Amino acid sequence: MENLEKPSSKIIGLIGIGLVGTSLAINLIAHDYKVIGFDINEKQMKNFEKIGGMLANSPADIAEKTDVIVFSLLTSDIVLDVIRGKKGILSANKYPTTIIDTTTADPIKTDKIYSILLENNIDYLDATISGSSVQIKEREGTFMVGGNKSVYERHGDIFSAVAKETIYVGSSGTGARAKLAVNLVVGLNRWALAEALVFAQAIGLDLQKTLEIFTKTQAYSSILDAKGEKMINNDFTTQSRIRQHRKDVSLMIKMAQKENLQLQLSAQHLQLLDNMIKNGDGDLDVSSVIKAVRNYGLGNR
């Protein structure tokens, strides 16, 4: 982590208090930030209040109470609505100075968001995170940040509070692009691990011993640490949802098509994820890909 300047305020807004947003809030509160949050889900708001967060009535309400707002939302379209919609940030009497957007977003729409905020003198960092909600809670996620470097440096303490590792990627939009590239590798590694474990069991290997072998050979990746035990124990409690990763893979393919590039493995991966959602598994943890491999292989059945 670079030696970054301290922010001027210890009050932060948070819009989106799902799995990742809650993990971010826990770390910010633990580092003595006052966090003002909003989510359309009332249950998540109540949970946020229990961990020490302060509730707001709308994005506009947050904008009027703090200069820095963190987004943890599902899609770029939701981000745009939070900014421009009814009771959105731009409807407030006072605008924030900086928005830090952790959404895994459509990079084309990220560019649009940057332009809208720039027109309203609001600094924008697309600060995507690699890691599950559990890893983020433990500060084991890695931030990939795009935007003005001086703005990034000015808010260094915020990034230090929520992650041990932060990488400044470059100009606005590069954080969103980097996240898609990372998730391409991560998703295919999960699929490969699931298929290898199903294969190992089919040929008579002990799965616990197989994980140990993978860990000590070139088969190792950090996916083993994050999802290996969950896969062999059929523990699909949600840390990162299949449905959300499907959205990411579709964005990868969309961006690749724009560059006249075919992502053959990712196209097959998208088919697998679509079949999982069709079979009612969209809200399971991404480790449940092993269930799909067992049940319908490569997604052709």
Image (cartoon, rainbow, N blue to C red):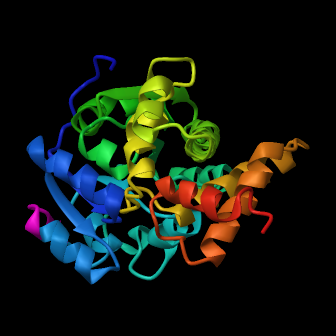
> Quick check: 281 above or below 70?
below
9, 245: nearer the viewer: 245
Q: Is residue 120 magenta?
A: no
Q: Residue at x 29, y 28 (%)?
A: 164
Q: Where is residue 291 drawn, in percent x and y?
A: 55, 61
Q: Residue at x 47, y 24 (%)?
A: 213
Q: Tell me if I can see residue 225 in this picture.
A: yes
Image quadrant occupied by the C terminus: bottom right
Q: Residue at x 51, y 70 (%)?
A: 78
28, 296: nearer the viewer: 296
Res 219 quadrant in image: top right
297 horizontally vs 6: left or right: right
Image quadrant occupied by the N terminus: top left
> Quick check: 94 above or below 1?
below
Q: Where is residue 292 drawn, in percent x and y?
A: 61, 61
Q: Residue at x 10, y 45 (%)?
A: 30
Q: Write the start and end of the magenta stretch as one range.
A: 50-55
Q: Residue furthest front?
A: 204
249 horizontally vs 226: left or right: right
